């Protein structure tokens, strides 16, 4: 399968070290980026004219709460993953399937949480829902975990395990042992931070806990929805090395404080993004773009860096090969442009102002799943144009 994108006005790499690419065309072959600015050659299954718009990696949501398929019981809603695709999200990572109806947070045990993660990995994580790459099967760690439980998670393909209900300060050595077992099996550790979660059963977690635990990712450090104190945020930026996650459902004041300090301390390589949805905040298809635009329009970050935080940084934090436009990387791509009425003459200007872009195309592994008009954004002033689409199907890759 061969796809060509041409007429690119702005190209964002997703790589914080080199955020903009001087690229006007790219070829995608068998799902991966094969060439930049190569001469058009032969037949293509799809040819897309970006019409001077922007090309960027598909957004990576590092903090979602799936349950089974595209049903979320917290909002009793169906089809949410497909809506997020139309908001520019092409990959998402579960931060725990804790919204299963009837789950008794007060009586969790190692066998139950492991089995729940394995089942979700084998169902929600097995199928491309609406084409989005959903990495499900994140275990909610509890006391009593053994190496055999971690073996089951690794065999199921779990990428992440999470401390949220675990009494970390009461059982430090056990928490550190579980972390070592997880790392030995290639599973990364995320930790709920800040105040009590929607569940009402999580534990408080700030810098004093994180400094000895040393997770891979500190979840929603500016609120999920309640943030840790600003003095703890400062300590995390100044004294820690692990990734710091910001979610769209958090505290905007704390996010502004965190991001400004990370910019001042040259620590943006540690910033990753998520939505922490579906949940009490709702189903928010543009939630990840909202966080990106908060970085540009409120925090003053340049658009290329903000895009890199929402793509390459978040993918790297979770061990994914997506989020960066480079030869050999997956062809997960968003084509977008400024909307009529937006600030400035081009995509970069509107993004810097914090204006939502108009999405006209989303590709996953080179397959155009959103074509001509997103259902979740205003139309771009100059939408992408399609020709010679010869796909036998335009549905969801399984």
Image (cartoon, grey):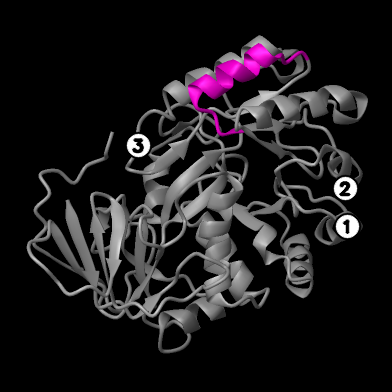
Sequence order check, earlier mark of 2 and 1: 2
- Image position, residue 170 (x, y; %): 92, 25
User: Would residue 23 appear left or right of 268 to someone viewing this image?
Assistant: left
Image quadrant containing the C terminus: top left
Q: Which mark is residue 128?
A: 3
Q: Secondary structure at mark 2?
A: helix
Residue drawn where x is 38% and y is 50% of the image: 85
| Image vertical order of residue 234 relative to residue 391, above or below | below
Q: Count residues near mark 2 (Cα–Cα under 10 Å), then give few for <14, some for 14-19, many for 20+.
A: many
User: Marks 2/3: CA distance?
Assistant: 37 Å
Sequence order check, earlier mark of 3 and 1: 3
Q: Which residue is mark 2?
A: 207
Count up the numbered dots.
3
- Image position, residue 106 (x, y; %): 76, 17
Residue drawn where x is 54% and y is 29% of the image: 158
| Image vertical order of residue 219 relative to residue 353, above or below | above
Whether residue 113 appears in this view of the structure is no
Residue drawn where x is 65% and y is 10% of the image: 111
- Image position, residue 84 (x, y; %): 43, 49
Q: Count residues near mark 3 (Cα–Cα under 10 Å), then give few for <14, some for 14-19, many for 20+.
A: some
Q: Residue furthest bottom?
A: 345
Check if mark 2's residue and mark 1's residue have beta carbons within 8 Å.
Answer: yes
Q: Nearer the viewer, residue 61 or 237?
A: 237
User: Would residue 50 appear left or right of 346 to someone viewing this image?
Assistant: left
Q: Which mark is residue 235?
A: 1
- Image position, residue 145 (x, y; %): 72, 16
Whether residue 106 is in magenta: the answer is: no
Q: Nearer the viewer, residue 204 or 304?
A: 304
Q: Which residues are magenta?
A: 144-160
């Amino acid at each position: 399968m061969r796809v060509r994108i041409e007429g690119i006005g702005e190209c964002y790499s997703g790589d914080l070290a080199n955020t903009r690419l001087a690229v006007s065309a790219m070829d995608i072959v068998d799902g991966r980026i094969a060439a930049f600015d190569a001469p058009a050659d032969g037949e293509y299954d799809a040819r897309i004219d970006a019409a001077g718009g922007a090309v960027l990696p598909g957004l990576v949501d590092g903090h979602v709460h799936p349950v089974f398929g595209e049903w979320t019981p917290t909002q009793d809603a169906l089809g949410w993953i497909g809506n997020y695709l139309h908001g520019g999200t092409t990959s998402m990572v579960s931060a725990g399937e804790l919204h299963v109806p009837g789950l008794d947070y007060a009586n969790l045990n190692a066998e139950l949480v492991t089995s729940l993660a394995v089942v979700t990995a084998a169902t929600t994580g097995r199928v491309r829902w609406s084409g989005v790459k959903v990495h499900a099967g994140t275990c909610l760690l509890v006391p009593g975990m053994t190496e055999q439980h971690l073996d089951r998670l690794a065999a199921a393909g779990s990428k992440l395990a999470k401390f949220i209900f675990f009494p970390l300060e009461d059982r430090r050595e056990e928490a550190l042992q579980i972390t070592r077992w997880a790392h030995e099996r290639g599973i990364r550790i995320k930790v709920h931070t800040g105040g009590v979660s929607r569940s009402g059963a999580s534990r408080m977690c700030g810098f004093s806990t994180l400094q000895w635990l040393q997770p891979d990712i500190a979840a929603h450090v500016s609120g999920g929805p309640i943030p840790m104190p600003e003095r703890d945020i400062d300590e995390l930026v100044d004294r820690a090395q692990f990734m710091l996650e910001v979610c769209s459902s958090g505290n905007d004041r704390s996010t502004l404080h965190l991001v400004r300090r990370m910019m001042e301390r040259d620590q943006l390589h540690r910033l990753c993004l998520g939505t922490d949805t579906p949940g009490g905040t709702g189903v928010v298809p543009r939630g990840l773009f909202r966080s990106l635009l908060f970085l540009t329009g409120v925090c003053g970050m340049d658009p290329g860096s903000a895009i890199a935080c929402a793509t390459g940084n978040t993918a790297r934090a979770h061990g994914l090969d997506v989020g960066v436009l480079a030869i050999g990387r997956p062809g997960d791509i968003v084509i977008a442009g400024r909307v009529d009425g937006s600030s400035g003459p081009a995509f970069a200007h509107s993004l810097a102002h914090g204006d939502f872009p108009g999405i006209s195309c989303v590709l996953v592994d080179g397959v155009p799943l959103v074509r001509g008009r997103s259902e979740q954004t205003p139309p771009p002033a100059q939408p992408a144009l399609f020709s010679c689409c010869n796909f036998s199907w335009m549905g969801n890759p399984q």
